[in-house]
Image (cartoon, rainbow, N blue to C red):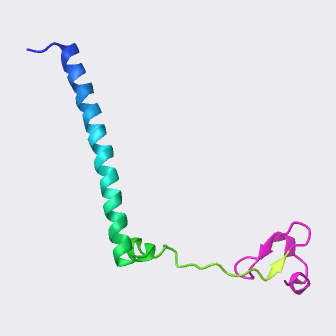
Amino acid sequence: MSSLAELIAQKEELERQIEAIKQKERKEAIAYVRSVIESFEVTPDELFGKPKGGKSAVAAKYRDPVTGKTWSGRGRAPTWLEGKNKEDFAI
Protein backbone atom coordinates (compact mmCIF):
# COMPACT_ATOMS: atom_id res chain seq x y z
CA MET A 1 0.00 0.00 0.00
CA SER A 2 1.20 3.51 -0.82
CA SER A 3 1.90 6.09 1.82
CA LEU A 4 0.01 9.35 2.02
CA ALA A 5 3.05 11.29 0.78
CA GLU A 6 3.38 9.00 -2.26
CA LEU A 7 -0.31 9.36 -3.12
CA ILE A 8 -0.12 13.15 -2.82
CA ALA A 9 2.94 13.18 -5.11
CA GLN A 10 1.09 11.02 -7.65
CA LYS A 11 -1.93 13.32 -7.48
CA GLU A 12 0.22 16.40 -8.07
CA GLU A 13 1.93 14.72 -11.05
CA LEU A 14 -1.43 13.74 -12.52
CA GLU A 15 -2.74 17.30 -12.07
CA ARG A 16 0.34 18.65 -13.95
CA GLN A 17 -0.25 16.17 -16.77
CA ILE A 18 -3.94 17.03 -16.93
CA GLU A 19 -3.19 20.74 -17.14
CA ALA A 20 -0.58 20.24 -19.90
CA ILE A 21 -2.95 18.13 -22.00
CA LYS A 22 -5.82 20.55 -21.35
CA GLN A 23 -3.76 23.51 -22.62
CA LYS A 24 -2.62 21.60 -25.72
CA GLU A 25 -6.14 20.44 -26.60
CA ARG A 26 -7.54 23.92 -25.93
CA LYS A 27 -5.13 25.48 -28.43
CA GLU A 28 -6.05 22.83 -31.00
CA ALA A 29 -9.77 23.38 -30.41
CA ILE A 30 -9.44 27.15 -30.81
CA ALA A 31 -7.51 26.72 -34.06
CA TYR A 32 -10.17 24.32 -35.39
CA VAL A 33 -13.08 26.59 -34.44
CA ARG A 34 -11.38 29.61 -36.02
CA SER A 35 -10.82 27.71 -39.26
CA VAL A 36 -14.47 26.63 -39.43
CA ILE A 37 -15.67 30.17 -38.68
CA GLU A 38 -13.45 31.57 -41.44
CA SER A 39 -14.43 28.85 -43.94
CA PHE A 40 -18.17 29.41 -43.47
CA GLU A 41 -17.95 33.16 -42.77
CA VAL A 42 -19.91 32.78 -39.54
CA THR A 43 -20.76 36.06 -37.80
CA PRO A 44 -20.81 36.57 -34.03
CA ASP A 45 -24.59 37.13 -34.16
CA GLU A 46 -25.07 33.81 -35.95
CA LEU A 47 -22.87 32.04 -33.46
CA PHE A 48 -24.06 33.59 -30.21
CA GLY A 49 -27.37 35.22 -31.18
CA LYS A 50 -28.27 38.86 -31.07
CA PRO A 51 -27.54 40.81 -27.89
CA LYS A 52 -30.38 40.58 -25.40
CA GLY A 53 -32.53 43.57 -24.65
CA GLY A 54 -33.11 44.44 -28.28
CA LYS A 55 -32.29 48.05 -27.57
CA SER A 56 -30.29 49.95 -30.08
CA ALA A 57 -28.41 53.14 -29.40
CA VAL A 58 -30.45 56.28 -29.99
CA ALA A 59 -28.79 59.48 -31.10
CA ALA A 60 -28.67 62.28 -28.56
CA LYS A 61 -31.05 65.18 -29.22
CA TYR A 62 -30.18 67.45 -26.31
CA ARG A 63 -26.87 68.48 -24.71
CA ASP A 64 -26.08 70.25 -21.46
CA PRO A 65 -23.54 72.94 -22.43
CA VAL A 66 -22.08 73.00 -18.92
CA THR A 67 -21.34 69.30 -18.42
CA GLY A 68 -21.59 68.00 -21.98
CA LYS A 69 -24.07 65.32 -20.89
CA THR A 70 -26.64 64.31 -23.48
CA TRP A 71 -30.19 63.01 -23.58
CA SER A 72 -31.96 61.22 -26.42
CA GLY A 73 -35.39 62.59 -25.54
CA ARG A 74 -36.55 59.15 -24.42
CA GLY A 75 -37.37 58.18 -20.90
CA ARG A 76 -37.30 60.47 -17.91
CA ALA A 77 -35.80 63.89 -18.55
CA PRO A 78 -32.47 64.56 -16.82
CA THR A 79 -32.29 66.96 -13.88
CA TRP A 80 -30.28 69.50 -15.88
CA LEU A 81 -33.42 70.04 -18.04
CA GLU A 82 -35.89 70.45 -15.19
CA GLY A 83 -37.85 73.70 -15.44
CA LYS A 84 -36.11 74.68 -18.71
CA ASN A 85 -37.17 74.72 -22.34
CA LYS A 86 -35.62 71.58 -23.79
CA GLU A 87 -35.50 73.15 -27.27
CA ASP A 88 -32.84 75.54 -25.93
CA PHE A 89 -30.60 72.49 -25.50
CA ALA A 90 -31.33 70.85 -28.88
CA ILE A 91 -28.29 69.58 -30.73
Instruction: Name the main secondary structure of what is drawn in magenta.
Output: loop
Rendered-image quadrant of the N terminus: top left
Q: Residue at x 52, y 79 (%)?
A: 54
Q: Name the residue furthest bottom.
A: 87
Vertical placement of residue 87 versus 79, above or below: below
**Magenta stretch, residue numbers:** 64-91
Q: Position of residue 16 (x, y in %)?
A: 29, 32
Q: Position of residue 45 (x, y in %)?
A: 44, 76
In the image, 6 versus 50, the foreground residue is: 6
The image quadrant that residue 69 belongs to is bottom right
Vertical placement of residue 69 versus 7, above or below: below
In the image, 25 versus 53, the foreground residue is: 25
Q: Name the residue furthest left.
A: 1
In the image, 8 versus 29, the foreground residue is: 29
Q: Residue at x 41, y 75 (%)?
A: 49
The image quadrant that residue 42 belongs to is bottom left
Q: Position of residue 23 (x, y in %)?
A: 33, 44
